[in-house]
Image (tube, grey):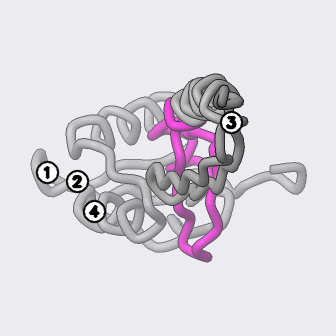
Amino acid sequence: MTEQPQSPQPIKVKMKVGNLEFDIEGNPEQLEEAMKRILSTVTEYGKQPVIVTEAGRLSTKTETCKGVIQRLWAEKWFASSRSLDEVYNQMALMGYHYDRTAVAHALIDLVKEGVLGREGKPRRYRYAQKRPPSAES
């Protein structure tokens, strides 16, 4: 008697990459190609920066340090004077973890642009709103 070649049994694969999960079922030839496609897509997805905002929503939009500080200014957070440490901690609460030096440089840039005012002595500067945000901000 001659044995007839059996069709390959479908294989089930469950993949988990980061917080993404995939269930794939098919014959071995199909699975290899499908897995390559999925992994290439997931790697491209993983290269996008992900930011968790304070409301817990995921966002792939990136913001500069200066942009985050300008947003605080637009929200009138600088209505009372704030120290570098207060600004740094507030940004951290919002999910932005920039180096303190970057925050200091961004604050200096905004002082030079006339957006914020600076008072006090070196290493103890306080930053406050120099002009109020306009209606369109």
Q: Residue 83 shows which numbered tag?
A: 4
Q: CA–CA distance between discs 1 and 4? A: 11 Å
Q: Residue furthest right?
A: 136
Q: Are marks 3 and 4 in contact (CB under 8 Å)?
A: no
- The amino acid pointed to by label 4 is Ser
The disc labelled 1 sits on which kind of residue? Answer: Lys
Tell me residue 31's x, y (percent).
Answer: 63, 34
Report the residue marked by disc 2.
Answer: 125
Q: Measure how far apart labels 1 and 3 are at the Cα level.
A: 83 Å
Q: Which residues are magenta?
A: 45-71
- In the image, taking residue 105 as reference, residue 91 lies left or right, namely right
Which callout, 1 or 4, points at the residue further toward the start of the chain? 4
Q: Which residue is mark 3?
A: 6
| Comes first in the chain, label 1 or label 3 | 3
User: Mark 2 or 3, which is nearer the eye?
Assistant: 3
Q: CA distance from mark 1 to mark 2?
A: 6 Å
Where residue 24 appears, x then y in whole percent? 66, 49
Of the pair 74 and 23, the residue shown nearer to us: 23
Kindly indicate whether the residue at mark 4 contacts the one at mark 2 (C-beta within 8 angstroms). yes
